[in-house]
Every structure is written in C-alpha cells, then in structure tokens.
Image (tube, helix red, strand yellow):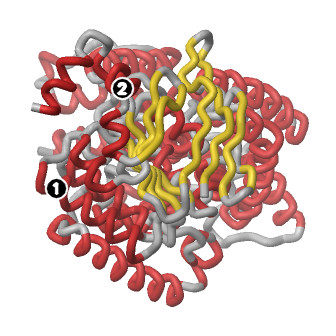
C-alpha cells in the first residue's frame, strides 16, 4: 500500500505536475496560433518569437521594478511587469500588421503567401529580441520558489517519495485558467468576440454585415499579444528565458494547435495537454514508479525511458503526423483553408 | 439607383462579364435571368464588391462605387445574399440576425468593459428586432437553433432576414428560390413584395423560376454570354425570340412557340 502511494507521488512529482504546467503553457501559445489561423487565415510562424519578444520586454520591466525595490511578495515580480510586456507586444504586433500584413490582406494574398510573410516577420523579431536582451539565458523568477518542497512533503506524509510543488507551477495553472476563462467569456458573450467568431465562421458574410473587419483584426492581434506574452512569461518563470528555446517552442505549439484542430480554441487547449503529456511520458524514466509497483523479482534494471529527452520534439512531430493521417481536421473539428 | 456601365470581368481568357450595361431603377424589383454561365453571379460579385472589375463602372445614385469593399457598400445600404446561403454556423439564428447592424456599442474593447449597461440595452433592442424579423418570415420557432442545423430553404429566409435588420436601399438576391419548396418560395416572394412596398427596398433578383420572376419582377433583364441580351416586362421577355434562343438553342424555338400557343 505504501509502495503504491509512493508510486503515485513519484508519478505526480515527475510526470503529472510538470506536464500540466507545460501543457498549460503550450495551450496558451496554441490559442494564439489558432486565433490567428481562424481569423486572419494563416499559420503564424512568428508566434514563438512574439512570445520571446513579450517575455524579453517583461524581463526588462521586471529588472526595472527590482532596481526600484518593487516586489510582489512571494509572487514573482514578473507578474507585475506582465501587463507592460503585453502592452509593448501589442504595439509591436499592431505595427507589424499595419506595415506588413495589411498590405497582403488588401491584395487578398493566398494563405501560403502570408505564411512565408510571417516567416520574414519571424526572422526580424528573432533579431529584434536578441538585439534587445541578448542571446544568453536569463533567469528572472524571484519570490518564493516552492509552495511545498519535497522534504516538507516527506516530513508531512512520512512517505519515501517527495512531491515538490513549485510556485511557478501553481502560477502557471492559475493564470492559464483565468486567461482561458476570460478568453471564452470574451468570444462567447461580447459583441467583439462574436464578431471574431462570425469572421471565423464565414468571412464573406461577415464582410457583408456591420462587422468592421479592421477592428476584428486589431482585436485579434491584441488578444494574441496578451496570450503570447503570458505564455512566454509563464514558460520563462517555469524554466528560463532563452530566445532560441522560444523559437524552438514553435513546433510543440503548432503541434498542439493542429492536433486539437486549427481554428478551434477548445481544441488548442486539448492539443496543448495531449502534446505535453505525451512528451513527458515518453521521455520520463519509469524505473522508479515501476519499482514501487512491481514485485521485487520483476523490478526493472534499466531506466525504462522510451526516448531520451533530446527527442522530445520528435514526440510532438510523431503526434502531429499520426493525427494528420487519421483525423486531418484535428481531434476536435478545426477548419482547413 | 444602380447604373452599370460597360462592365467587364475576365478570368484569364474567360470573359465572364463581357461589356454589360444596365440600370436598376429605384423602387423596382428587377429580375435578372439568363442561362447558366451567363455571368449573372459574377455581375453580382462585381457590383457587391467581392470581385474587382477588369474594366467598367458601377454607379449608385450617381456616385461611383466601383471597387468599394463589401463592408463599405454595406454602409451605403447595398446588401446581397448568396446563391448557396451563407450563415454563421456556430451561432443561433437569432444571433445571426443580431450580428448584422453596424456600429454596435459592444464593438469596442472599452465599451465591453466599461459600458455594460448601454450594451445590454442595445442587445435587448436588437433581440426584439430579430424576433420581429423572424416572425415576419414565419420562422420564429428556429430562433434558438444553431444556424448550421436549419434547412437550406430556411437559410435562404435567414439571409433575407439579415437585410431586414438594417435600413437597406438595394438588395441583391442571388437565386433566392434555389432549393426552396413552393410554400417557402411564396413566403419569400410575399416578403420581398412587402419590403418593396412598405420599406421602399429596391431589389435585384437572380432566379430561374419563371413563375416567380413573372409574378414579382418588372422589368426583367436577360443576360447571355456576359452581355445584356434583352430588357423589358416579364411578358415581353418571354416572347422575345433572342431570349428563347439563348435558353433553348435554335432548333427548339418553334416547338416552344407551338407549345406556348397551344
């Protein structure tokens, strides 16, 4: 019985808690991608770098606050700086839209052209981020590191295994829940949100209504700025910030959005968790959990790790391919342009 | 009301609209007929701003509206429906209608957060208006259904309903009767006549059902091969030899005439 509890705790500690946190971050990122796809009708390759830009600005503001001696108690100062990061990112995205995307929208450019355009934007943002904050790794999490440490948990329960819950994990999950609830309220209950859904449902018809297309586009970018910056900051708090890592995040984020069904917000969230849980379960060494669960004679000698963590992006890819093969519109019905 | 001057729309080498000139008089219900591929829908798409013309002009009350976006034309009171009805599938029938009017309070982010009362009052008024429209069209029972789930004919009615949510000046109806049963078609016809008489809407109607055209439309414009072939009252058009020829080909002409007189 104790062994069983130990196994559960180990599973929670090494798989479920980290995957939930990672899944929430991916879900927020994928929501941004899916909104752009649903409304502006292209896959935005610059999304990872938008996240990086928002995070970089948030880090700069965090440093500024820290230099002024402003803190947020046990919570990271970055949460105070987040609204500023979102605001600056929103300006950047609106500026990009005005200077780049609007031109192609007026030309009624094909989605594939917009994808290539977004790659160009990606490279520029890539450079911009490195120019603003540099290429090094930045750790900007401050405040309390743990809600409960492994030792505290062990002393509390008397089990051999410890369950450490980091502040960043709790913040990630709580923030993600709040952001997603606010987004769905916005999309389903407000006129602006309904205009966005109408635009996504049927662009031709939306253009023939009292819906102002430029305003819908503007609100979309504002939401994307908020989602991308929040996702980026949460990921940075949980791990660390490095521009290249954020660029690499593009793959799992797109995998999440596509797996769930591009253009479908609920799908993006589902996809985020599917990808995160698969990545973590495939790259986790199951030896510990199995040793607790199996009789001593069957206890594994090896690590029982299906893939080395180096291959975690391969897992995203594999899921992507499998879902596209068997359900091309995603787990929940998305749309295809 | 609407004047089309020497309009061309070419797709590569294919001349879908090939020098069409026509006029839609204010207060009329103008019928637009012609065999498949005559360029009727392309003409609609160009007038309604969905496609830019290759050359030519479209005037509305003397003002050049060539190349304006559908959204800008909407604000000028020019509305259209589609051959295959379009709808916002994820919303209810009532919500579909409530989407139509422009410049609603709830459209700006500021109002969304800080003027909830004003938005709620406006939404109530819109919902009431939408319910009146649905009653007019005899589809009140569908108000809370998802628009993707109603029948094709009901979608046509919904499209007509959209034009009633605002003060339209001219409405272009593209095959309003396609896939609609007789009873529903009569309902649509009655609605068009009432809107024309009571609200002063001008209509331009593409339709293949000649009974429907004959009952509603005057004048009728006939298109063939991208050009305007004939124009006049419905009775006059049905007598026109060129028209019969365009529809049925040369060989059948005498047979039809014989049938018509018999």
Locate residue B237 relative to residue A235 in the image: left or right: left
Which mark is drawn over residue B155? none
> Dot 1, crowdedness within 10 Å: few (<14), some or many (≥20)?
some
Q: Which residue is drawn at 72% across and 47% down?
A: A55
Q: Identify the secondary structure beneath mark 2.
A: helix
Mark with earlier residue (2, 1): 1
Q: Residue at x 31, y 45 (%)?
A: B235
User: In the displayed structure, would residue A248 be above or below residue A175?
Assistant: above
Q: Nearer the viewer, residue B95 or A241?
A: B95
Q: Are marks 2 and 1 in contact (CB under 8 Å)?
A: no
Q: Give residue A261's position: percent from left, percent from top.
A: 37, 34
> Dot 2, crowdedness within 10 Å: few (<14), some or many (≥20)?
some
Kindly identify which chain the residue marked by label 1 belongs to: B
Q: Which of A240 and B259 is in front in this view?
A: B259
Q: Name the residue under label 1.
A: B184
Q: Give residue B136's position: percent from left, percent from top.
A: 25, 73
Give me the C-alpha separation between circle 2 and circle 1. Answer: 32 Å
Q: Name the residue under label 2.
A: B241
Q: Which residue is drawn at 60% across and 78% down?
A: B111
Locate residue A184 relative to residue B248 in the image: left or right: right
């Amino acid at each position: 019985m104790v062994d069983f509890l130990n196994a559960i705790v180990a599973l929670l500690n090494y798989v479920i808690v980290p995957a939930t946190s990672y899944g929430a971050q991916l879900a927020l990122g994928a929501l941004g991608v899916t909104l752009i796809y649903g409304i502006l009708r292209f896959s935005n390759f610059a999304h990872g770098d938008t996240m990086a830009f928002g995070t970089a600005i948030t880090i700069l503001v965090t440093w500024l606050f820290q230099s002024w001696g402003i803190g947020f108690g046990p919570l990271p100062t970055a949460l105070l700086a987040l609204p500023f990061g979102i605001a600056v990112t929103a300006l950047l995205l609106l500026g990009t839209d005005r200077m780049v995307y609007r031109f192609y929208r007026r030309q009624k450019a094909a989605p594939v052209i917009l994808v290539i355009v977004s790659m160009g934007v990606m490279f520029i943002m890539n450079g911009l981020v490195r120019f603003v904050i540099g290429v090094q790794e930045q750790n900007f999490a401050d405040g309390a590191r743990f809600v409960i440490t492994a030792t505290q948990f062990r002393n509390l329960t008397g089990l051999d295994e410890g369950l450490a819950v980091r502040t960043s994990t709790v913040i990630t999950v709580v923030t993600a829940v709040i952001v997603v609830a606010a987004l769905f309220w916005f999309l389903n209950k407000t006129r602006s949100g309904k205009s966005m859904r109408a635009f996504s449902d049927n662009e031709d018809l939306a253009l023939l209504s009292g819906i102002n297309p430029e305003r819908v586009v503007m609100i979309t970018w504002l939401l994307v700025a908020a989602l991308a910056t929040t996702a980026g900051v949460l990921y940075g708090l949980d791990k660390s910030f490095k521009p290249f890592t954020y660029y690499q995040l593009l793959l799992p984020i797109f995998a999440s959005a596509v797996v769930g069904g591009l253009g479908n917000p609920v799908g993006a969230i589902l996809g985020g968790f599917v990808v995160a849980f698969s990545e973590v379960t495939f790259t986790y060494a199951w030896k510990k959990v199995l040793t607790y669960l199996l009789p001593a004679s069957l206890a594994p000698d090896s690590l029982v790790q299906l893939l080395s963590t180096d291959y975690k992006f391969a897992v995203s890819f594999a899921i992507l391919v499998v879902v596209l093969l068997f359900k091309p519109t995603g787990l929940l019905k998305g749309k295809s342009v | 009301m609407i004047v089309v001057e020497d309009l061309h729309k070419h797709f590569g080498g294919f001349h879908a609209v090939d020098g069409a000139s026509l006029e839609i008089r204010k207060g009329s219900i103008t019928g637009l007929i012609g065999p498949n591929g005559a360029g009727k829908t392309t003409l609609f798409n160009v007038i309604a701003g969905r496609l830019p013309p290759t050359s030519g002009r479209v005037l509305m009350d003397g003002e050049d509206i060539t190349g304006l976006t559908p959204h800008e034309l909407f604000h000028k009171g020019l509305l259209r429906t589609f051959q295959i009805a379009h709808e916002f599938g994820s919303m209810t029938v009532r919500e579909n209608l409530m989407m139509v009017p422009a410049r609603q309070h709830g459209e700006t982010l500021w109002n969304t957060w800080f003027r909830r009362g004003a938005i709620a009052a406006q939404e109530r008024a819109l919902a009431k208006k939408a319910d009146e429209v649905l009653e007019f069209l005899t589809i009140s029972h569908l108000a809370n259904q998802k628009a993707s789930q109603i029948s094709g004919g009901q979608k046509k009615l919904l499209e007509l309903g959209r034009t009633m949510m605002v003060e339209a000046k001219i409405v272009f109806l593209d095959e309003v009767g396609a896939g609609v049963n007789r009873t529903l078609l009569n309902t649509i016809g009655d609605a068009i006549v009432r809107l024309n008489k009571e609200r002063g809407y001008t209509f331009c109607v593409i339709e293949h059902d000649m009974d429907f055209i004959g009952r509603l439309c005057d004048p009728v414009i006939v298109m063939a091969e991208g050009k305007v072939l004939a124009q006049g009252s419905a009775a006059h058009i049905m007598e026109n030899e060129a028209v019969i020829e365009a529809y049925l080909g040369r060989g059948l002409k005498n047979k039809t005439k014989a049938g018509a007189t018999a």
